[in-house]
Image (cartoon, rainbow, N blue to C red):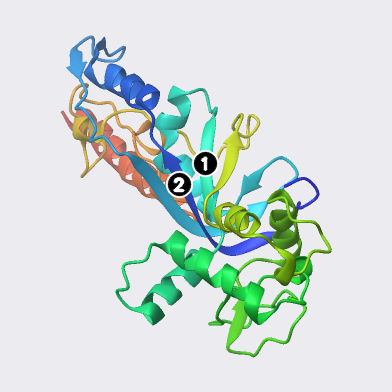
Amino acid sequence: FNGLAGVSVPLARMTLKVTDEMTSSADASSDSVKEEPTTGKNTKKKRRKKATTIIQEGPLLITHHGVSGPATLRLSAFAAREFHAVNYCSTVNIHFCPQWEEEQKKLNGDSGTSGEGILMDYLWEMTRKLPKRQICTGSPLLVKNTGDDDRASTGSSTTPNNMPTIPKRLWSALVQHSGIPPNMTWGDASKSMIRSLSNNISSFPLTVTSKGVFKEEFVTAGGVALKEVQMTNMESKVVPGLFICGEVLDVDGVTGGFNFMGCWATGFIAGEGAALACCSELEV
């Protein structure tokens, strides 16, 4: 992604394969009995259901330091504990054209061919249909255009009804990353080159080395369990008179203002609950 800062993909799919190290760490924290500092009581957290993969879709933005955008933020939220278990060092696979793949599956019907197989067959067909066209020119993977967004140039005309799934700069980088020379035409490409390109498009391995720097976080995971809080006034069921809201609670929403809304709503309810509790004490 070096030199691609600012490039965005309209819809990408990010997949984190959950390893044994991630699940064993999560299980250890789930099964351990801890003493709560506010209650002095022993509590045992319920074991979370194991997942083999965690998948999120949405727009993807390439930045100077890595990737961001809704897809990235959603994955970091839903896989917060798994990332933390491996100190934010793992591999995430990116599919750059899931919408194209879904449209092709509908066109082909129930052929039994996997999404990866459909992509490979389509790209290999380009060696016959466009033998003299340079592969780096642009992505031949087009999807229906449902909006009025600007379309990236692909080196060939596109109609208002379709648009390339992968921006030209990113496509060129993926082509070269697959071992295909910049000036190579589709007709000169070998099957192994096309297969490598197909794999990088549908399952690009992105190495995660760290999380964003301090103070860039959107929300924190973990906190007081919701089952320990009375939702009508946000009062603790364990410590009467203690009202809890916002980031203190073990809840975090996806990007798009849901966390703000959660903080404001629970803060309002907790404030009213605390005020009523104080008034009740004064009346007594």
**Does the rendering let one see residue 37?**
yes
Residue 250 in percent (x, y) is at 34, 34
Return the disc, 1 or 2, that comes first in the chain's sequence: 2
Q: Residue placed at 30% from the left, 18% from the top?
A: 29
**Which numbered circle lies on residue 92?**
1
Q: Is residue 64 left or right of residue 183?
A: left
**Does the rendering let one see residue 221?**
no
Q: Which residue is mark 2?
A: 15
Q: Residue placed at 46% from the left, 34% from the top?
A: 220
Q: Is residue 38 above or below residue 272?
A: above
5 or 108: nearer the viewer: 108
Q: Residue placed at 64% from the left, 81% from the top?
A: 129
Q: Residue placed at 40% from the left, 30% from the top?
A: 81
Q: Is residue 69 left or right of residue 22?
A: right
Secondary structure beneath dot 2 equals strand
List the single residue furthest toward the left: 284
Q: Amino acid at mark 2?
A: Thr
Secondary structure beneath dot 1 equals strand
Residue 122 in percent (x, y) is at 54, 72
